[in-house]
């Protein structure tokens, strides 16, 4: 199963991100319900590995991160447009802790640099110069983007299903779980 661990932004932040998508000159906007901050992309994992990870995550302390999004940029070899995240040592520590829990659950992850962001649009493989110029103007106009700061207080395990219309994300569990709920 294709899965990832992420922080799920609250509605006011989602609203600001959707507002930022307005006037996008090219690419495919990420649907409102799919907006998230990926902490660890797990790739395709067998059910047994995800069950072991679920067990490991049960003891995860509640994160208390006050996050602030910044203006958009182009990430991933110019394939996505994403809102940046202001530097936060707690976010980096949470990412490292989650990678360690994944390793303990038997999940091997590639070594990648952690660049916290929220993807807001996916770009086509090729961009003509005129469209590139329009995109540069669009990005410059949103450099001062501001969304409400948000308190990230739980990590969510998502399943990601690829479809011809793009990925669909489904929340499988939250850590720690909301009061009165169990994960798994």
Image (cartoon, rainbow, N blue to C red):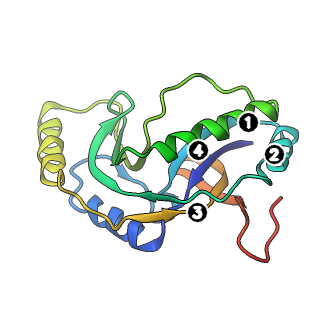
Which residue bears the numbered disc 3? 153
The answer to which of marks 2 and 1 sits earlier in the sequence is 2
Identify the residue shown where x is 37% and y is 35%. Answer: 79
The image quarter in which residue 46 lies? top right
Callout 3: SS: loop
| Left or right of 126, for residue 133 | left
In the displayed structure, would residue 33 be above or below residue 157?
below
Q: Name the spot of residue 118 as percent of width and height, x first.
A: 42, 50
The answer to which of marks 3 and 4 sits earlier in the sequence is 4
Callout 1: SS: helix
Image quadrant in which the C terminus is located:
bottom right
C-alpha separation, residue under disc 2 versus residue under disc 4:
14 Å
C-alpha separation, residue under disc 3 versus residue under disc 4:
11 Å
User: Marks 3 and 1: CB-CB under 8 Å?
Assistant: no
- Numbered circle sitting on residue 94: 4
The answer to which of marks 3 and 1 sits earlier in the sequence is 1
Which residue bears the numbered disc 2? 56
Q: Is residue 106 visible?
A: yes
C-alpha separation, residue under disc 3 versus residue under disc 1:
19 Å
Q: Name the spot of residue 163 as percent of width and height, x first.
A: 58, 48
Residues packed near mark 1 inside 10 Å, few (<14), some (14 to 19) or many (20 plus): many
The answer to which of marks 2 and 3 sits earlier in the sequence is 2
In the displayed structure, would residue 154 be above or below residue 45?
below
Q: Name the spot of residue 40 as percent of width and height, x first.
A: 60, 40
Callout 4: SS: helix
Q: Name the spot of residue 157 as percent of width and height, x first.
A: 68, 52
User: Marks 2 and 1: CB-CB under 8 Å?
Assistant: yes
Farthest residue, direction top: 111
Identify the residue shown where x is 75% and y is 30%. Answer: 103
| Number of the front mark, 1 or 4 | 4
Which residue bears the numbered disc 1? 102
């Amino acid at each position: 199963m294709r899965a990832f661990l992420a922080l799920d932004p609250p509605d006011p932040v989602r609203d600001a991100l959707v507002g930022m998508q307005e006037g996008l000159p090219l690419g495919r906007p990420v649907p409102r319900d799919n907006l998230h901050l990926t902490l660890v992309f797990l790739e395709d994992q067998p059910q047994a590995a995800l069950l072991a990870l679920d067990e490991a995550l049960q003891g995860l302390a509640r994160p208390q991160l006050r996050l602030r999004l910044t203006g958009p940029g182009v990430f991933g070899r110019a394939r996505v447009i994403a809102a940046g995240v202001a530097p936060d040592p707690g976010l980096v520590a949470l990412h490292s802790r989650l990678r360690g829990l994944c390793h303990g659950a038997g999940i091997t992850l590639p070594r990648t640099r952690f660049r916290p962001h929220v993807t807001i649009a996916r770009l086509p493989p090729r961009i003509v110069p005129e469209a590139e110029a329009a995109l540069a103007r669009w990005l410059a106009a949103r450099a001062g983007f501001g969304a409400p700061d948000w308190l990230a207080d739980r990590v969510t395990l998502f399943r990601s299903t690829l479809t011809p219309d793009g990925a669909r994300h489904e929340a499988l569990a939250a850590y720690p779980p909301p009061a009165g709920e169990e994960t798994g």
